[in-house]
Image (cartoon, rainbow, N blue to C red):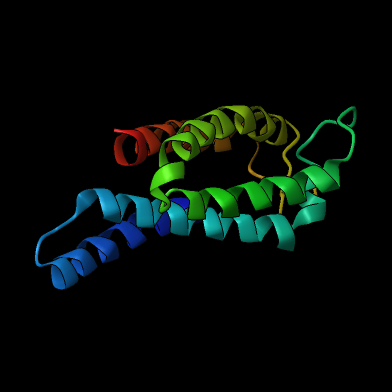
């Protein structure tokens, strides 16, 4: 839920900022700033809660801790790449693929009732998916609308 608040809160602030500094509202720039802020926020979790996040991956997946660090770095790279005109389109395409690929880990974690911050099995469970799946779809739409369109 926190990433959604970061996304929407930053979007509103960025809309106001573009109105002040550009004398007109720049929805596209505000959308990219908001997505970038959300990605930086979620990337932070990859480094703060590595052990718990690695439990989101099934046991048969090798190098789980390293994959968590790698996906955190991918989120940081994407947060930056959207602002570089030469990389904007490829970043958007790769972000959509990334969001599709990480959805199964969220489903697996929900089935296991995993709390990624602690690594314990006292999480929200399957009810979490009623939020997570629509949020994942929102992120995919957001990337398409603000980055690729």
Q: Is residue 105 visible?
A: yes
Q: Position of residue 145 (x, y in %)?
A: 30, 35
Q: Quadrant of the C terminus?
A: top left
108 sits left or right of 9 in the view: right
Give the residue at the far left of this rendering. 23
114 or 8, nearer to the observer: 8
Q: Position of residue 112 (x, y in %)?
A: 76, 34
14 or 6, nearer to the observer: 14
Residue at the location (71% across, 30% down)?
A: 108
Whether residue 98 is situated above or below residue 87 in the rendered picture:
above
Q: How many marks?
A: 0
Q: Position of residue 51 (x, y in %)?
A: 82, 53
Q: Quadrant of residue 17?
A: bottom left
Residue at the location (73% across, 47% down)?
A: 70
Give the residue at the far front of this rendering. 86
Q: Position of residue 100 (x, y in %)?
A: 56, 27
Residue at the location (66% across, 58% down)?
A: 45
42 sits left or right of 138 in the view: right
Residue at the location (25% across, 48% down)?
A: 28
Whether residue 40 is situated above or below residue 59 in the rendered picture:
below
Q: Quadrant of residue 139?
A: top left
Q: Quadrant of residue 98?
A: top right
148 or 35, nearer to the observer: 148
Q: Is residue 119 visible?
A: no
Whether residue 126 is situated above or below residue 72 in the rendered picture:
above
């Amino acid at each position: 839920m926190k990433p959604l608040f970061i996304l929407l809160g930053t979007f509103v602030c960025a809309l106001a900022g573009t109105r002040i500094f550009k004398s007109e509202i720049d929805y596209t720039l505000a959308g990219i700033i908001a997505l970038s802020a959300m990605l930086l926020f979620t990337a932070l979790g990859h480094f703060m809660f590595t052990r718990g996040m690695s439990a989101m991956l099934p046991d048969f997946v090798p190098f789980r801790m390293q994959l968590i660090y790698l996906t955190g770095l991918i989120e940081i790279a994407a947060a930056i790449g959207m602002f570089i005109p030469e990389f904007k389109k490829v970043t958007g395409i790769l972000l959509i693929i990334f969001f599709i690929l990480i959805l199964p880990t969220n489903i697996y974690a929900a089935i296991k009732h995993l709390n990624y911050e602690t690594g314990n099995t006292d999480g929200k469970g399957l009810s979490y998916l009623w939020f997570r799946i629509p949020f994942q779809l929102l992120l995919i739409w957001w990337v398409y609308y603000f980055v690729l369109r």
